[in-house]
Structure formats: C-alpha cells, structure tokens
Amino acid sequence: MANNLIISYEKKDDNQLLQEIMHLLPGSLHYSLTHSEFKNEEVEILRKIILACDNIIIYSPIYWNDLPAKIKLMIEKVIYGPDFYEVVNGTEIEGKFTGKKMVVITTSGNSYQYLKDNHALDSFFLGTVQQLNFSAADWFSFQKFPDGSYKSQYFSDMVDRLRAIK
C-alpha cells in the first residue's frame, strides 16, 4: 500500500496544481470525492485505505473561508468512525491517528495571510485534527487568480515538507 493518500475535492486530470502535488509524491494513492456519495461500501473501502497509509493529504478549495461540505462530510462519515477514535470519560473524543501526518492544501481567491488572519480553518485544525491526534499537521494555501493560475509564497516550503514525508 502507498504511504500517502491524497484526498481531493477535484479530479486530478482537471487541476494542474493537484497534478504537481501528485508528481512530488510519486506512488501516492489519489481518491477524488467528485462523485462520492459516501455509501457504506465506499466508506469502508476509504477507511481501510486511510488505516494503511501514514500520511493523509487533503487537497481542497476554500469556499467562504471554510472547507466545502463534501470534505466535511467525508470527515464525518469516514474519519469519525470506530476505527479512528474512542470516547474517553464519557464525552471526549480521543483519536487513533498517532504516528500519522495530515497535510491540508487549499486554494482560494484570498491570500493565505487573509485566511490565517481571519481564522479560516481554525475549527478544523484546533478541533478535528487535534481531537484525532495526528502526529503532525500542516496547512498550505494557494491563491487562485482569474486566469486559473495559482500563487503561494510558501510553495518551496510546501515542496520541502511534502518531500520530507515520503
């Protein structure tokens, strides 16, 4: 099984940045949520893949300063399953992702600094990622321009960090 799983909101053939990320992580599995309905069989398959991978990379656009509903639904249906967490003290969720890394790569019409200053994804990182006990988590955001191109002052940093998780 591949060491990396890239879960995306888009098909890789439709997105140049996603293709570049796949190129940086050769041998990674790619799972597109484009036509996902999260039926039981699909959920179980995706859970098995996640359990077998060391690194989970989520690639998604940001709409109105947050992740799209389809990404949130995937997390709720797939990651918040019995294989991934247990309830402690009757109310607290303790995740079983110790030893796994998560990288979230987003695209947005806004700059990374704007998103960070306005606390976009805070609930995702301070809530979900911490609850699930990922060993490490990174977030990289790319600003999308009207011509379809992407820009990030952190691209070389992202490349270095992605290469380090191989």
Image (spheres, rainbow, N blue to C red):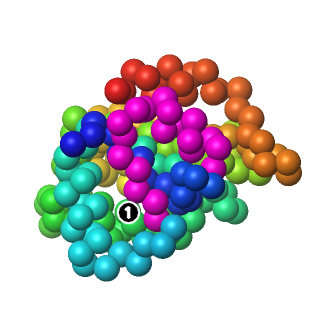
Residue 82 is one of the magenta-drawn residues: no
Q: In the shown orientation, is residue 163 left or right of residue 152?
A: left
Q: Position of residue 33 (x, y in %)?
A: 46, 65
Number of marks in picture: 1
**Going by the picture, which residue comes out furthest to the front?**
13
What quarter of the picture does the C terminus occupy?
top left
**Going by the picture, which residue comes out furthest to the right?**
146
What quarter of the picture does the N terminus occupy?
top left
Figure check: 9 above or below 56 = below
Q: Position of residue 25 (x, y in %)?
A: 43, 32
**Which quadrant of the view contains residue 92?**
bottom left
What element does badge 1 sit on?
helix
Residue at image x 25%, y 78%? Answer: 40
Q: Which residues are magenta?
A: 15-33
Q: Position of residue 103 (x, y in %)?
A: 44, 39
The three-letter amino acid code for the residue at tag 1 is: Ile
Closer-to-camera residue (21/78): 21
Q: In the shown orientation, is residue 51 left or right of residue 158?
A: left
Closer-to-camera residue (65/148): 148
Figure check: 119 above or below 112 = below
Residue at image x 60%, y 59%? Answer: 66
Residue 24 is one of the magenta-drawn residues: yes
Q: In the shown orientation, is residue 90 left or right of residue 116?
A: left
Q: Which residue is mark 1?
A: 75
Q: Is residue 51 visible?
A: yes
Residue at image x 40%, y 56%? Answer: 31
Q: In the shown orientation, is residue 128 left or right of residue 10?
A: left
Q: Is residue 114 visible?
A: no
Q: Position of residue 65 (x, y in %)?
A: 66, 57
Figure check: 134 above or below 73 = above
